[in-house]
């Protein structure tokens, strides 16, 4: 393995995914964290914002305005900002550093800001801004026109198990949403094999509260979240078009999807119970075999032993996705359970997995921590 060290920046370092990126990367042998950018937390030492990371030798949080992009010495940036903010920041930093992706995509450069000799900084965006192929779909679901349509089209969808080769040479990666990650890993092989009916997929999802980010929201108050749970986004959650886009590619035709997320009183973790119709002649065991064969060599996706019910505790703090398939009492149907940690395989861990591919490092570097159990 190469002994080269790569210089990394994190935008949105004071958020939940930012904190987990720092946690994971601090154990990565080829990475030096050189830039940490916060929003309201800018100017504060990281040890004050995140005391649990205080033992690490890391730079203080600075604001976006303080970053001197032209000439900056970074190999890769994680952008863990909210959607909408992300697309503007990514476009801005590409202009400021004279990124060659702008030329490839024939985007007009602001020549005054271009530093001609600067190497391209690879970018991994954790927000939803570069996941959707169609700008009209983005506008419909995110309520505003996309401000960097060409970049949206030029980004690689960062699900390594399905886009590994494209990720190796990508300069802009769109990390999948947490709900889509758990669903797509369970369903794409089955759709590719035409083993399930693409018209009647029902995904019942539960997420821990970190899925909603760290900014204070009235609906996230302890007294209203603890000892309770509720569905949200009923019939219209913004992860639906993302899942439909990727599932349609696997099925070779549009899919029919019902998806209902629920907020449950736990910090991290995500569980999806997925109801599918079996294709003619297929059994629940067949689905399990297809998944087990598809993921036999994958380090981060595993089909549980027959009969073992995946639980969020089985993956907590790890980059693992654990899946299993069960017979339904109703003939012709099956139940699939898929679990991930939303902050690891659902965001920061998956982002580091993509980074390893982009930098030519072994894909598992820094990511083999076992889950925290119990
Ligand atoms: N949480 C999760 O499970 C997942 C999250 N994601 C996506 O990852 C991204 C980050 O999520 P998460 O870490 O949970 O979010 P948080 O709300 O926890 O953190 C957001 C970060 O962005 C900074 N920030 C917010 N607005 C601005 C702005 N206008 N300019 C500069 N910085 C800003 C915040 O700084 P400060 O707090 O200092 O103001 C903070 O560092 C989001 O796009 C989210 O949708 C994707 C998959 C899963
Ligand atoms: C519990 C909770 O609120 N979860 C978030 C999804 C987190 C995520 O993956 O969102 P992005 O698409 O923004 O990356 C939600 O439902 O909006």
Image: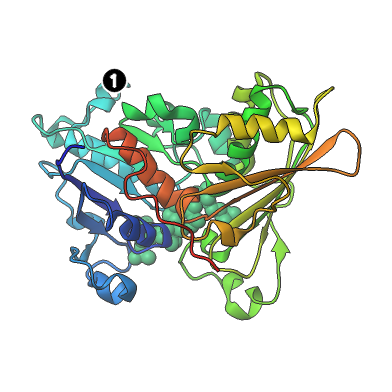
Residue 320 screen position, x and y as percent: 50, 49
Q: Quadrant of residue 110?
A: top left
The residue carrying mark 1 is: 104
Residue drawn at x 8%, y 30% is 117
Residue drawn at x 45%, y 53% is 344
Side (left or right) of 241 relative to 160: right
Res. 82 visible in picture: no
Side (left or right) of 94 relative to 265: left
Side (left or right) of 257 relative to 156: right
Instruction: Give the camera-side residue of 221 and 160.
Output: 160
Residue at the bottom extreme of this rendering: 223
Q: Quadrant of residue 125?
A: top left
Residue 353 screen position, x and y as percent: 38, 42
Instruction: Give the camera-side residue of 341 and 126.
Output: 341
Residue drawn at x 73%, y 49% is 307
Quadrant the N terminus occupies:
top left
């Amino acid at each position: 393995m190469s002994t080269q060290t790569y210089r990394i920046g994190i935008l949105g370092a004071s958020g939940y995914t930012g904190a987990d990126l720092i946690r994971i990367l601090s154990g990565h042998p080829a990475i030096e964290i050189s830039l940490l950018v916060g929003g309201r937390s800018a100017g504060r030492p990281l040890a004050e914002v995140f005391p649990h990371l205080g033992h690490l030798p890391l730079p203080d949080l600075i604001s976006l305005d303080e970053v001197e992009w032209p000439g900056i010495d970074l190999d890769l940036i994680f952008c863990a900002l909210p959607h909408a903010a992300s697309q503007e920041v990514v476009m801005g930093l590409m202009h400021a550093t004279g990124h060659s992706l702008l030329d490839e995509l024939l985007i007009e450069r602001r020549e005054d800001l271009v530093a001609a000799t600067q190497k391209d900084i690879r970018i991994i965006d954790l927000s939803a801004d570069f996941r959707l192929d169609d700008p009209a779909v983005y506008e419909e679901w995110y309520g505003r026109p996309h401000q960097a349509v060409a970049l949206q089209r030029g980004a690689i969808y960062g699900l390594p198990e399905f886009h590994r080769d494209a990720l190796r040479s990508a300069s802009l990666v769109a990390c999948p949403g947490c709900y889509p990650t758990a669903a797509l890993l369970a369903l794409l092989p089955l759709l590719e094999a035409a083993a399930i009916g693409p018209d009647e997929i029902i995904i019942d999802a539960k997420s821990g509260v970190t899925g909603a980010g760290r900014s204070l929201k009235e609906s996230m108050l302890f007294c209203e979240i603890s000892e309770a749970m509720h569905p949200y986004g009923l019939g219209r959650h913004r992860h639906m078009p993302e899942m439909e886009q990727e599932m349609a590619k696997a099925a070779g035709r549009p899919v029919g999807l019902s998806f209902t997320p629920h907020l449950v009183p736990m910090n991290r973790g995500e569980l999806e119970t997925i109801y599918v119709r079996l294709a003619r002649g297929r059994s629940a065991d067949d689905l399990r075999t297809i998944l087990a064969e598809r993921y036999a060599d994958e380090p981060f996706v595993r089909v549980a032993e027959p009969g073992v019910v995946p639980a969020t505790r089985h993956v907590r703090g790890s980059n693992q996705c654990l899946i299993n398939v069960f017979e339904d009492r109703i003939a012709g149907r099956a139940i699939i359970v898929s679990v991930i940690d939303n902050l690891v395989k659902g965001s920061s861990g998956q982002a580091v997995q993509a980074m390893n591919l982009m930098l030519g490092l072994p894909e598992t570097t820094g990511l083999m921590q076992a889950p925290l159990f119990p």
